[in-house]
Image (tube, helix red, strand yellow):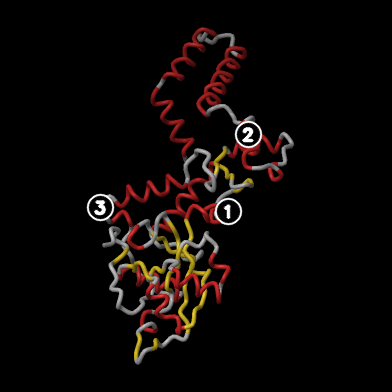
Amino acid sequence: MVSHWTYKPVDAEQDLDQGDIVILSEGLKSLLQEVHPHFLDPKYLAFMVLTQSCDLVRRKGECKSRYITLACIRSLEDVLIGLLDQVCAGIGGGTYREESRGEAKRLLQRIINQNEQALGLFYLHPDADVGIAVPSIAMLQVSIAVRRDHYDTIRSARAGALDSEFRNKLGWLVGNLYSRIGTPDWSDRKDGQKAAEKIIKDHLKRAAVPNLPRWVSGEAVDAAQKAGLDLSKLSEQEIVSEVAKHTPKPLKTRVTREVARVLRELLVESDESEMSEADVDRLLRRLDNDARYSSLLRRKQSE
């Protein structure tokens, strides 16, 4: 019994449907070994049926379509760097400017809510009953065609199916129609928003995790490049290490220093100033401990 609301149970005797999830059974492995051995690579976790459902109905033993098209399913983590390279400000080696993290978050939001049309991706949430173990995506532009003679082999390897709303959305994406098919956003489901945010957070975390992106300050990158460093020739770890040496002081520290500079210039320029050096020091300490001042600067830094 499937547990996630994007899927539905399947009857083993039912004809294939667009959106069916097909795992690598022994029969399918043997078939791929003959016709598409490249797709036996472990990076391909499973496959999704892309052929329209109406063309998969069997009449007199055969379906209408001469070929059954299967899209490759891969782990989201494995392809994430390649996807971020298309939308984020990259430095090299899977490292990106911290300032472009928002673009990464928006990309993952589009993917999870099935709204990433340009890249041809369809998100699949983990569900053991349909053969999806980790957050994954069906890559609609990476597919294979199998003759209808192998219909039973594909059907016997079927582990799950999309719920009707999501099957409709898949059909629209595949057919490149001009009208928009709506599917519920995760935020429309109970606890869905929290679950979606966790997926995004897990894939964009700051900690060093293999296959996942690294984030560094754009200001630090600019400072490192200004100092003559060619970051494009460095490994991911070297980039992070070298950029860290050029990390600027926190915004609050820099602003407070500028305030101090201006005040001290005024003291020098004005003989009639009633403010003393001790007053300047007290003001700076007051600013340093002022919650509203700190909050405004944090808000500005996060924009």
Identify the residue at horizontal 58%, vertical 16% (top origin): 266
Judging depth in this view, the residue of 183 and 207 nearest the camera is 207
Total numbered labels placed on residues in the image = 3
Judging depth in this view, the residue of 248 and 159 nearest the camera is 159
* Residue 108 vertical placement versus 99 (above, below): below
* Residue 138 vertical placement versus 218 (above, below): below
CA–CA distance in space, label 3 to label 2 = 42 Å
Residue type, label 3: Lys
Instruction: Place residue 96 in its image quadrant.
Output: top right
- Which dot marks residue 28? none
Residue type, label 1: Asp
Crowding at dot 3, Cα within 10 Å, few <14 / some 14-19 / many 20+, comes out as few
For the N terminus, give its image quadrant: bottom left
Identify the residue at horizontal 49%, vertical 39% (top origin): 206
Q: Which residue is mark 1?
A: 85
* Residue 282 vertical placement versus 144 (above, below): above
Q: Position of residue 118 (x, y in %)?
A: 50, 65
- Which dot marks residue 241? 2
Mark 1 or mark 3: name the one nearer the start of the chain: 1
Crowding at dot 2, Cα within 10 Å, few <14 / some 14-19 / many 20+, comes out as few
Residue type, label 2: Ser
Q: Which residue is mark 3?
A: 190
Labels 1 & 2 near each other (Cβ < 8 A)? no
Q: Residue furthest bottom?
A: 60
Q: Secondary structure at mark 3?
A: loop
Mark 1 or mark 2: name the one nearer the start of the chain: 1
